[in-house]
Image: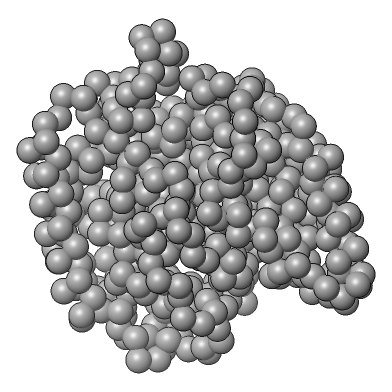
Amino acid sequence: MTNVQEEARMPGGSGPGGGVPGGSAAGPAALTATELLAGYASGELSPVTATQAVLDRIAEADPRINAYCLVDRDAALAQAGQSAERWRRGQPLGLLDGVPTSIKDLFLTRGWPTLRGSLSIAAEQPWEADAPCVARLREHGAVFVGKTTTPEFGWKGVTDNPLTGVTRNPWDPTRTSGGSSGGSAAAVAAGMGPLSVGTDGGGSVRIPAAFCGIFGMKPTYGRIPLFPASPFGTLAHAGPMTRTVADAALLMDVVCGADSRDWSQLAAPEGSFRAALEADSLAGLRIAYAPTLAGAEVDPQVAARVARVAKLLAGLGAEVVEAAPEFEDPVDAYHTLWFTGAAKVVERLGPEQRARLDPGLQEIVAQGAEKSALDYLGAVDTRMALGVLMGAFHETYDLLLTPAVPVPAFAAGVEVPQGSGLARWTGWTPFSYPFNLTQQPAASVPCGTTDEGLPVGAQLVAARHGDALVLRAAHLLQQELLREGVVSTDPVG
């Protein structure tokens, strides 16, 4: 078992869009989960071969990307061997038997430390529990190859921390992978495992999905149970991160199982999320296309790629209207909820431990500690009003289309784009955190690249409980983009 605790070195000779020098994922490491499972079922492919290929890809690519904070080759190959024997007998354990999978290092994982990117957590202690989504993955036979990096306690929209250093973008390792699920996004994009589960408290699945050119979805709050409960409260969701929407729907069918440890979980979904992908058009749907929200500035190339998505959705049968929900930027309310959550995260730490925290985290902790109960409840009022507004908006429009992130990936190792004058990561993520406040399902769908070869994501948002609708529209959109050669589901680098 390898536990990475040093910053990845800067790559040499890798230009924008160049990915990781030294080759790209090939063979089983380049396959999606759906393709792997078909190979296992036919006998043409073994879980051991697939897992070894992913582990080899990690050994090749991750020293330059730094997506993994822990890799357990022996455990992964042992699990793969057990899976191969089940497939040989024709008795797969579940829907993901033998699929190499990574887990963000915010989720408890039995037998592995969950250090949350922090120097304040001791690795040498019993690790005896699985988070709900990890337990469901284990029950369905997924092969755990390792844990992926996160900013400390998942506090920001890029991925670097005092424990494991900077995580980089496989499309251009001088750029950020985004965050806080940046390790998961980079791993999936680079062929270092086709499936990962991330968390999203303000865009933490959708931001890195957009930057790394993969699909990432934040389901309705409570759809995927959480334990322990997030200190950031009901802002925090778990969500699938994959190269295809089909794989995400498959993953959703696994991780949305009930868990009594989460008192706020939703009732079990009716039917399979994969069934939502059987539709062949978007006829009858009304989609609002919002080039911006609350006056946020959008990079022209990002805007152009998302505008093209609006036309494609219309071509798929939807009625697409340029319209936006009319609300003011709720960032102040979001900061109150997020910063007080950060203060709660580190409440137990002494002065020496606090001094070793990410400096930016220290800053928001101090601000959060100054908030009063009335400040907090005022933010809740703003959140509830936004929820009412969006509920009314979705009585007219089935889906909302926006950019996922208004800028392409910028330099790795910084919280905000250099020269932007912004103070915090929320300054460049205006399309993500509003929908954590409202708990709506939202996804980032890769929709092309900039002239520099950096991925762009289009965000699809539905009313609460509209998870299947988001998947349906995202799948049809991805299939159209694939047919036109605008995107690829192949690993990058």
Residue 305 vertical position relative to residue 23 in the rendered view, above or below:
below
Closer to the camera in the image, 312 or 67: 67
The answer to whether residue 362 is left or right of residue 275 is left
Closer to the camera in the image, 256 or 475: 256
Residue 334 vertical position relative to residue 90 in the rendered view, above or below:
above
Closer to the camera in the image, 211 or 137: 137
User: Tell me, what colour scheme is on the image?
Assistant: one colour
Closer to the camera in the image, 458 or 344: 344
Q: Residue at x 41, y 55 (%)?
A: 262
Q: Position of residue 204 (x, y in %)?
A: 43, 46
Could one spot residue 222 in this view of the protein? yes
Q: Position of residue 492 (x, y in %)?
A: 68, 51
Q: Residue at x 14, y 40 (%)?
A: 376
The number of callouts visible is 0
Q: Residue at x 41, y 78 (%)?
A: 469
Could one spot residue 172 in this view of the protein? no
Q: Position of residue 412 (x, y in %)?
A: 51, 31
Q: Which corner quadrant of the image does residue 484 belong to?
A: bottom right
Residue furthest out toward the top: 352
The answer to whether residue 77 is left or right of residue 168 is right
Q: Which corner quadrant of the image does residue 482 belong to?
A: bottom right
Q: Which corner quadrant of the image does residue 466 belong to?
A: bottom left
Residue 258 vertical position relative to residue 171 in the rendered view, above or below:
below
Q: Residue at x 19, y 62 (%)?
A: 387
